[in-house]
Amino acid sequence: MTTRLADIAAQAGVSEATVSRVLNGKPGVAATTRQAVLAALDVLGYERPVRLRQRSAGLVGLITPELENPIFPALAQVIGQALTRQGYTPVLATQTPGGSTEDELTEMLVDRGVAGIIYVSGLHADTTADMERYERLRARGVPFVLVDGFSPKVQAPFISPDDRAAMTLAVTHLVSLGHTRIGLALGPKRFVPVQRKIEGFVRAMQDQLGLSSDAVESELIQHSLYSLEGGQAAATALIERNCTAIVCASDMMALGAIRAARQRGLEVPRDISVVGFDDSTLIAFTDPPLTTIRKPVPAMGQAAVRTLLEEIGGTPAPHSEFVFMPELVVRGSTASAPGDRSRS
């Protein structure tokens, strides 16, 4: 027990006496200190004493696409932690190919009496989907927040990264390295984030390289699937069109683009530069470490929870979109354009 107290105290940055007070439920400990001790218990793998287990304020559903793309577990973790801190219990419902649909998962969560639902990259992002499902949900009195994807037809708060600005960041970086033949690899065109990335990319290519929108859209944009294989297929097509740099709409696609380059005997970044999107877990440790656009996951996840809890509390946010600015993270997968080695 003494060893355990010392471990927890060291992890939480407090005295053993403070740890003892928290574990024994004694008063006189600041809420932030108490939270630090509980977090230390969790990190070190100790079970919380029964008296310290928080009574749930209710269940909150979180519906995500597949978890193979590491950006979705990252968002789920941020949202789950933020909900837990507020006393709610997150219920993760994941869509898988051939598994439960978004509507089925919604029904399951509503049947379990959830206080609200957060949707990540759901049907709200698909311009061909029927948005009436969300109005039916609202009519049943279930608060919800939508992450990644916007529809003017849905009366709800939306949380999004600025996809247009993200493409400006990527293109500006590559143009500064001397690239003029820049390709864009992304998912199916029916999705709102895809359409916004195209708008941002086309505008940046017009502004910085003087290219016409028709030339950019017909020659330099390739649609595929949001997967490693999808990135590989899109990059292969763009390499055949003599692109010296490729911007990808996800880090998974970017890894596929690097694989495509290597299969053609090209070196990244010497022969071709690759930019990802998300800055998902471990992407800084790939070979080469990936230059990417960092999606503001912590800020977006916390905003989604804050907005949902306001809805649950009866002070709903306006029907609006909260847009978060991404940032460029430069690593080893981008370099000067071939034939332009005078640049740093």
Image (spheres, rainbow, N blue to C red):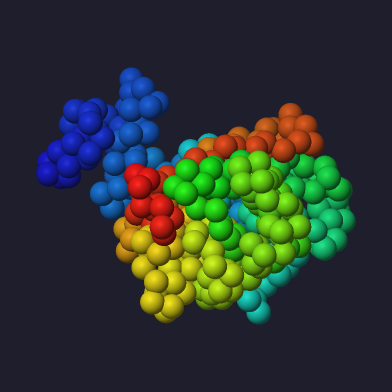
Residue 235: image location, x then y, percent: 54, 70
Quarter location, residue 322: top right
Residue 219: image location, x then y, percent: 67, 65
The residue that appears at 63% across and 71% down in the rendered structure is 224
The residue that appears at 26% across and 35% down in the rendered structure is 12
Residue 222: image location, x then y, percent: 64, 67
Please state if 47 lies on the left or on the right of 96 as rendered. left
* 231 versus 127 height, above or below: below
Residue 172: image location, x then y, percent: 53, 43
Please state if 113 lies on the left or on the right of 302 as rendered. right
* 207 versus 130 height, above or below: above
The residue that appears at 38% across and 27% down in the rendered structure is 32
Quarter location, residue 29: top left
Foreground: 187 or 267? 267
Q: Count up the numbered dots.
A: 0
Which quadrant is the N terminus positioned in? top left
Q: Is residue 271 visible?
A: yes
Foreground: 280 or 219? 219
Foreground: 264 or 339? 339
Which quadrant is the C terminus positioned in? top left
Quarter location, residue 125: bottom right
Which residue occupies the extreme left position in the image?
Answer: 3
Foreground: 261 or 39? 261
Q: Is residue 84 visible?
A: no
